[in-house]
Image (cartoon, helix red, strand yellow):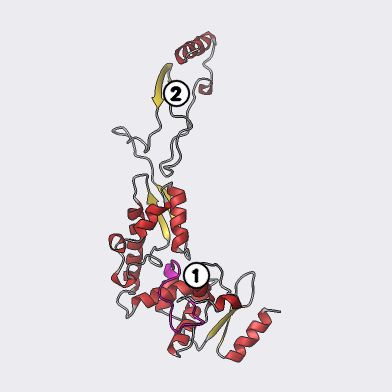
Amino acid sequence: MNVEDLLRETLAELADEERPPHPERFLRTLPPPRAHRRGVALAAAAAVVVLAAGGTVAVRTLSEPDRPAPPAAGQPRPRPDRFTVQEGIRLADLLGRLARVTGRPRESFERAARDGRALGLPLYAEGRLEGFAHPGTYEYTDATTPEQLLAAMVARFRTESARLGLDARPAPLDLVVIASIVQAESPTEADMPKVARVIRNRLDRGMYLQIDSPLLYGLGEYGTRATLKDVKQRTPYNTYRHRGLPPGPILSPGTAALKAALHPAQGPWLYFVAVDPKTGALKYATSEAEYADLVERAER
């Protein structure tokens, strides 16, 4: 039986009933295509959709388009989808998530990320996107290119940095690097200004930072606690072997971390120790002896 015969039979059955049946008896719909997943297609190359309205039945064939057809005149356009960049995400992870969510090849985002000029990166970023894809929620459609999406994140960073006065400070890249470490090491926003002060105090004294998160970033590992084996590794991000800051940001810092880098708390602290493995709560020390005592208590 072909489609036309099936429709005629169904309508004939409906005509014999005393009351109109619920529309679900004769209405079949396919879920609308989602614009944010280019890789998701209709289940079949062609499908028949039967639409019923007031006794009129229309049949139309849907092919599998690469992109949704534009809306008819007078009809609203599909609402854009949203993607949230989390504070503390690394660029490599961000690009992977963008590829999965949008259905575009990861290589297209990696290629876009390498073109700092097209993305509008500030000159002091030295062409590297890490640290400058600002956290927040972004809208996109199936027509949004990887370049446009990443450029929107850079534009938001530039808006925030200008508002905070970061660009007017000496060595703004150093401030973004500090903010990224602050973001990685701080369990709460309240800790951020103190962590920033520890970093500043150690830099001012010419001490090795000896902070784990940059080292782990350089090794492609995660966490905030390095092993003795990690500490021996050769990477420019090893703050146990190299004085000063690592060569670049290690993740995307949020606004609170940028503020902390710009305005560290006042205090003499030179160390911080995670004393609770469950919460990551930090304690601060001003001397090596005090630091050793905190480490001993944390490891009990």
Please indicate whether residue 295 sits to the left or right of residue 42 in the image.
right
Pair 2/1: label in front: 1
Q: Earlier in the sequence, mark 2 or mark 1?
A: 2
- Residue type at tag 1: Tyr
- Give the numbered dot on residue 237: none
Please indicate whether residue 228 sits to the left or right of residue 182 in the image.
right
User: Where residue 211 appears, x then y in whole percent?
Assistant: 52, 78
Q: Quadrant of residue 245?
A: bottom left
Task: Report the Cα–Cα distance between label 2 and label 1.
Answer: 52 Å
Magenta-drawn stretch, dominant element (helix, strand or loop) = loop
Q: Which residues are magenta?
A: 238-256
Residue 248 among magenta residues: yes
Q: Which residue is mark 2?
A: 48
Q: Quadrant of residue 150?
A: bottom left
Q: Which residue is mark 1?
A: 217
Q: Is residue 259 visible?
A: no
Question: Between residues 165 and 215, which one lies in front from this camera angle?
Answer: 215
Which quadrant: the C terminus?
bottom right
- Residue type at tag 2: Val
Q: Residues within 10 Å of mark 2 (few under 14, many from 20)?
A: some
Residue 71 among magenta residues: no
User: Where residue 99 appears, x then y in whole percent?
Assistant: 44, 51
Give above or below for 67 relative to 186.
Answer: above
Give above or below for 8 relative to 257.
Answer: above
User: Where residue 279 appears, x then y in whole percent?
Assistant: 62, 70
